[in-house]
Image (cartoon, helix red, strand yellow):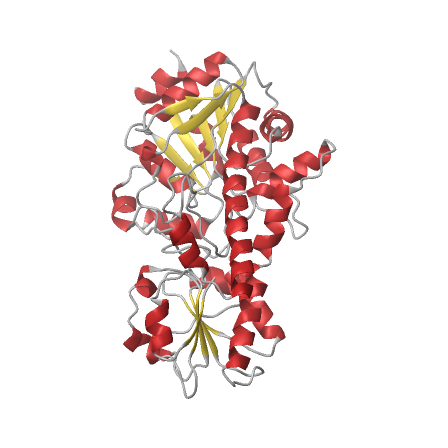
Amino acid sequence: MKLYDQLISKKAKLSLVGLGYVGMPIAVAFAKKIKVIGFDLNAKKIALYKKGVDPTHEVGNEVIEKTKVEFTSDEKKLREAKFHIVAVPTPVNDDHTPDLSPVEGASTILGRNLTKGSVVVFESTVYPGVTEEVCVPILERESGLKCGKDFKIGYSPERINPGDKVHRLETITKIVSGMDEETLDCVAKVYELVVEAGVHRAESIKVAEAAKVIENSQRDINIAFMNELSIIFNKMGIDTQSVLKAAGTKWNFLKFYPGLVGGHCIGVDPYYLTYKAEQIGYHSQIILSGRRINDDMGKYVAENCVKNLIASDKAVRGAKVAILGFTFKENCPDTRNTKVFDIVKELREYGINPVIADPEADAAEAKALYGVEFADIKDIKGIDAVILAVSHKEFSGLKMKAVDKFFGKGKKVLLDLKGLLDRKEYEDAGYNYWRL
């Protein structure tokens, strides 16, 4: 009996290695069709899942309570599964080189619990070649098995967008690949169990890896162009949002907007591609230029906050500044690689220690990663400047009456990074209003 048939007849199990924003929704989706083991090293996270709590907010507590996923932090449970999906993060080091330690660690754990006849599929975003050249040797070393003979491998890049309730695992076409036709067919059929939008069978594992890494690189470059335009138009005294609104009336104008580019995808993936390019002797020009622009936007925002404080006759050192929003994107608790912290660091260089409020953020994560503690938005008063940094639903509906209460005496400085508020309304009310 083939592995796919064993899975749907529930004679074999699927394992999900890594239960974060990507892995957990995948495990939950498959558990509606087949037997699933959900493994993560974080015992505290596993305990929450077992209690029916979703710390990622991706599917919600009610779904976690009802799921049939067998959550565990015991790696030996992986021996019960034959189809394995690895969905661990792939961050970058401080020097922007790929940090493959999570995927190497996952491969090590899975390798020493791998059994004959298994299929291993990696979902982590990597540069072309990592699956076959980095992960396979680890799996072989730890298991004592031979790839192609004792087990097979595939690659199917994740496309889950944290916090997005529309573009979900089920509704996004899934790229799948395998080391041979038989593996590709198996991987495709397994994913077709849960992906309603269907799958795209890539020609090779390297093609699938490359497709994923350029998706976010393309978006990063487009946002960098918007950020550069915002810098230029700001110097010209032209409102960027108004320019984009006008240009957007043309049918083929791409609707991107300026902003902070953080998180564990768009702000990271381009570095994986440029790293591999440099290994083969090519130094990226466009991709790295875009990265430099986007990486500097936090500093640019802080500088404009200072300029607007000065223009409003307010002292810079010791100024009271509030930042609303800290996560890397709206309506999501994830603070990893948030560029809002770049604003915080730069403001501190000017002698400003901003107060930060974010009702959506994972407070424990922010404290552990950045040493940041959040204030209750109700306690924000007597402020000189407010930076509206993230368009959480709690902030997008703010009325001027509520915004007024944040400020103290003198000119009100408001930096609306996402363009959530009506510029004319606030300028007419006497605000010193600025946006990207």
* Residue at 31% over, 51% down: 51
- The answer to which of 323 and 56 lies nearer the viewer is 323
Return the x and y of residue 374 as percentages of the image width and height.
Answer: 44, 70
Residue 1 seen from this side: yes
Residue 344 falls left or right of residue 63: right
Residue 99 seen from this side: no
Residue 110 falls left or right of residue 160: right
* Residue at 41% over, 88% down: 409
Quadrant containing the N terminus is top left
In this rendering, the answer to whether 403 lies above or below 144 is: below
Return the x and y of residue 119 as percentages of the image width and height.
Answer: 48, 22
Return the x and y of residue 147 as percentages of the image width and height.
Answer: 58, 19
Judged from this view, the residue extending furthest toward the right is 281
Residue 336 falls left or right of residue 57: right
* Residue at 71% over, 34% down: 282
Return the x and y of residue 86 as percentages of the image width and height.
Answer: 49, 34
Judged from this view, the residue extending furthest toward the bottom is 409
Q: Quadrant of residue 275?
A: top right
In this rendering, the answer to whether 73 lies above or below 351 is: above
Residue 102 falls left or right of residue 43: right
- The answer to which of 318 and 431 lies nearer the viewer is 431
Q: How many marks?
A: 0
- The answer to which of 262 and 397 lies nearer the viewer is 397
In this rendering, the answer to whether 20 lies above or below 169 is: below
